[in-house]
Amino acid sequence: MTPELRELYQEVILDHGKRPRNFRTVEAPTHHADGFNPLCGDKVHLKLVVERDTIQEAAFLGHGCAISTASASMMTGLLKGKSVAEGEKLLRSFCDLVVGTDDEAAAARDEVGKLAVFAGVREYPARVKCAMLGWRTFESALAQKEEPASTE
């Protein structure tokens, strides 16, 4: 990771970690899921409103480290207004960015926009699960799974 990207990564994580966007509840969600990272105890509760195949609303509550909070914050902001298919594509691209091969990660950087700052977690395997928690929870919410999403 370049020094410039590392600095941006730290700034974005700190900003969203301290002042998460969409950190609230949603009345009458159509989809919801809980997520849990047993490694560090992070928890997230995600609520979505999906109408006519479009994610109209996305918000979360929970507690966790700056990385899991920032990831969920940025995720919910980017999902709003996207079709479910676009949200699923963003999920796959984010997975490629943080847990894929080097080639997959390089290709994903162009597709994930602002989320590219999370490429830095690849250097810290224990933090990958923190970054993925919100995304695994999103995946569970779309599938309407009852059991909590896990990073394990």
Image (spheres, helix red, strand yellow):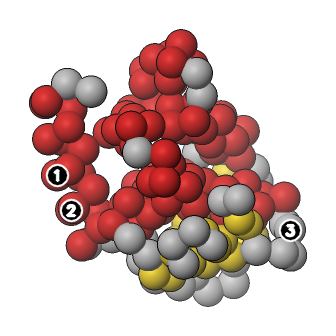
| Mark 2 element type | helix
Label 3 with label 1: CB-CB less than 8 Å: no
C-alpha gap between disc 2 and disc 3: 31 Å
Q: Is residue 31 left or right of residue 20?
A: right
What residue is pinned by disc 1? Answer: 11
Q: Amino acid at mark 3?
A: Lys
Residue at 17%, 52% in the rendered image: 11
Q: Is residue 21 left or right of residue 57?
A: left
| Mark 3 element type | loop
Label 1 with label 2: CB-CB less than 8 Å: yes
Residue 76 in the image: x percent, y percent? 49, 60
Residue at 46%, 32% in the rendered image: 112
What residue is pinned by disc 3? Answer: 145
For marks 3 and 1 on the same chain, the one whose residue lies earlier in the sequence: 1
Quadrant of res 118:
top left
For marks 2 and 3 on the same chain, the one whose residue lies earlier in the sequence: 2
Residue neighbourhood size for the residue with mark 1, other residues' Cα within 10 Å, grouped as few (<14), some (14–19), many (≥20): few
C-alpha gap between disc 3 and disc 1: 34 Å
- Residue 88 in the image: above or below residue 50: above
| Mark 1 element type | helix
Q: Amino acid at mark 1?
A: Glu
Residue at 50%, 31% in the rendered image: 97
What residue is pinned by disc 2? Answer: 15
